[in-house]
Structures are given as structure tokens and as C-alpha cells.
Amino acid sequence: MKTKLALLGIVLVFLAVYVTFFAPTPDLISPLSNSPLQENRQRSNSDYIIMGFAPYWNLKKLTPQSLENITHFAYFNLHIAKDGSVYTKVNSREEDPSYTNFKRLISGTINRGDKPLIITIMPESQEALKQSISSEKTRSNTIKTIIKVIKDSNASGINIDYEPLGDISTELRNNFTLFIQELRTQLDELDKLLTISTYASVATRPRLWDLQKLEPHTDYFVIMTYDYTLPGSKSAGPNSPLRGSGDLFEHDIIKNISEIVQLIPARKVLLGIPFYGYEWTTINASKYSPADSRGSVASLERIQEMLDDKTLELIWDRNSLTPYGVSSSSGQISQIYFENETSINLKIEFVKSANLGGIAIWALGYEGNNEWLWPTINLLSK
């Protein structure tokens, strides 16, 4: 294990040096080719997972290209109530939209192609997060619900997306581990996949997820390597920085993943790839400028439209190895930090060099008709 970690460390350092000196300049943002990192692969390319998360609010935006190029279709999401049952109604008259669209999905109304189906399970509230796994009874109810969902949908597996806010108790952390252990026993009887979504900082601030105890029961960990700079931040900044932690940021992807793979096998890690960025109104056009607004989501579709009509100036951030754009078309200065062909290409190279399990896309429907996107994603399988 120590030898593998040492080798991985060398690869990560090599990647950092490589992109520092050979990453594109602002006036030349194009895909890398013939990267020496491509020679580092240690297994068949067909083994990589490309999991595409399809939020219920984006189902009408799914494209044939997205369904063709993913390996697993992950429906997002089905909510769990406090007692472990499916959360079906927002109130006495209004059905929960995630449940409505789940029914449409399993009825065949929604085309998801012929890809294996993964159902994302998420508690409907922070209270439901705690209560649905707080006792042997509620854990059992939650697991029975999940098994029924799998059978009703003929799903190939499940994604557990429990995202606690703030610090949590040791008791809750232990209850989550018990929940996963008990769920795994039931899934083994059906030969189904179990994946868990976690924050990128999971190795340094575990919160809910005890990686080492969860690993024997988990097929893949979906690492949400985005939202590094969130709306509400005092300054604009990168959404998914490959590097830059230390003086610039508290975390970055290389740092986070190198810490995670010291606790679990690299092949069980799916790297999050965002098909969106964040936009802020800023006080000036300088990089990481203080923000005058909370910030809002900007899909790759909208960003590409702004680039096409010349209302967004594209700039390359060598610190984070991601692009950002500056616009003054509205009469105010705004900045958008996002992903493009080069930054996604670099992330794909990183997945290969670190021998990770693949990628998880958040989210299908945000990409629009960017012609470069799916060929870039498919570099993972070449």
C-alpha cells in the first residue's frame, strides 16, 4: 500500500508540474493531445465509469448524445421521509415532483437509453436525514423502501446522497455506517451496486462518512469535487479547482483526492465533473474580485451562448487550472467560473493518472449543445 501511495504521489506531483508549464495561455485554450500521462494507465479503458446524474427538473433536456456517452444513468432523486418511507407529498394537495418524475421514469415515459439505472436516495430534510437511520426500526424501514424502489424500477443500483449540514454527532456517524452495512447485506442478495456521494473534504473532515468502515460495503464513492466556492462567498472563485490549495484556497481536487485514496482504493473513487459554474456581480474585473451578489448557477449551455455572442471574455486561471469569464454587457461587471474543454480534459487526465474508478457528471441537461463536450468526456474511454 505504501508503495502504491508513493507512486500516486509522484504522479500527482508530475501532473501539477506538467499543467503549470504546459497548460494553455489565455489566448490558446485548446484540448491537450499526446499527454505523457496517457501512458500511465494501468487497466482497460472500458473499466471506467461515466455516471451521469439526471435531476428530475432536467429530464426534458436530456439529449441523445448524453444518453449515448454515459455508462450509468443516475436518476436524481427520490426523497426519504423521517420514518424511512418514500416522501410522496409536499402537502395534502401537492405531490413531491421528484416522486412524480420517478413514476414517469419507471413507466417508460422518460427515455434514459439502455444504460444501467441508478436511483439516488436523499432525505427530504435534515431531520429526515437523522431520523431515517436513527434506530434499528427506522433503518429497517428505510432499507425496505430502497429495496422496493429497486425492484419496482428494475434499477441496477442505488446512490445514497445524505448531505448533513454543519458538524454532526458521533452517534449519527455510527448510525450511517450501520445503515450502509445493513443495506449492503440486502443488496448483495439482489446483486446490485451501492454508491455513496460525499463532500470532497471527506478525508480531512469526515462528518457523516467513515470512509474506512464504509469502503468494504461500497462499490463506488461519488466525490463531489465542485462547489469549492459557493454562492454567498465574499469573493468570486473557481467552482472545481484542480489545484491551488494553500495560499489561495483551503482545498483543491488534487489535495482532496490524494487524501481520500490513502483511506480507500483509488478504483472506488468517481471524480465529480460539473456541467455548470457560478456567476457573481463583482466590484471589478480582477480575478477573485470581491462580490456584490450572492452568486447564481450558470449552466454550460448559458455560458456557451454568452461566448458565442461575444458577451463573455474568456480567461484562463493558471492557479486553479480552470477558465473564468468576465462580462459587462448588463452594465455591471460579472464573473463566471466554470469548466471548458481544457479544464475537463485535465480532469480526465487526472482520473487516468491516479487510476480512479471514473467520473460522475453533475448534471445532465446543463450541457446544452456544446460540440466539444462529449468527445472530451470520451477521452476517458480511449
Image: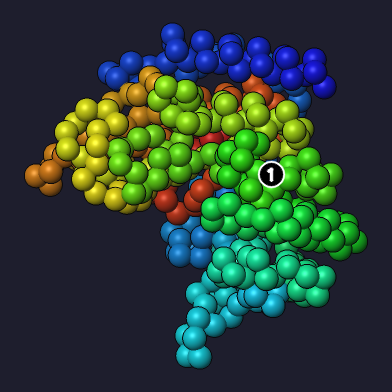
**Name of the residue lying farthest toward the bottom:** 92
Q: Residue at x 51, y 60 (%)?
A: 55
Judge from the rendering whether residue 189 lies leftward or rightward of residue 132; answer left or right: right
Badge 1 marks a residue whose secondary structure is strand
Estimate how packed mark 1 is, as few (under 14), some (14 to 19) or many (20 or more) residues with alpha carbons within 10 Å.
many
Residue type at mark 1 is Phe
State which quarter of the image contains the C terminus: top right
Residue 50 in view (yes/no): no
**Name of the residue lying farthest toward the right:** 189
Which image quarter: residue 78? bottom right
* Residue 371 x, y percent position in the rendering: 40, 38
Which image quarter: residue 189? bottom right
Judge from the rendering whether residue 88 lies leftward or rightward of residue 314; answer left or right: right
* Residue 313 x, y percent position in the rendering: 22, 31
**Residue marked by disc 1:** 221
* Residue 266 x, y percent position in the rendering: 72, 31
Which image quarter: residue 106? bottom right
State which quarter of the image contains the N terminus: top right
Foreground of the two, 350 or 257: 257
Q: Is residue 375 above or below residue 66?
A: above
* Residue 341 x, y percent position in the rendering: 42, 30
Q: Residue at x 58, y 45 (%)?
A: 199
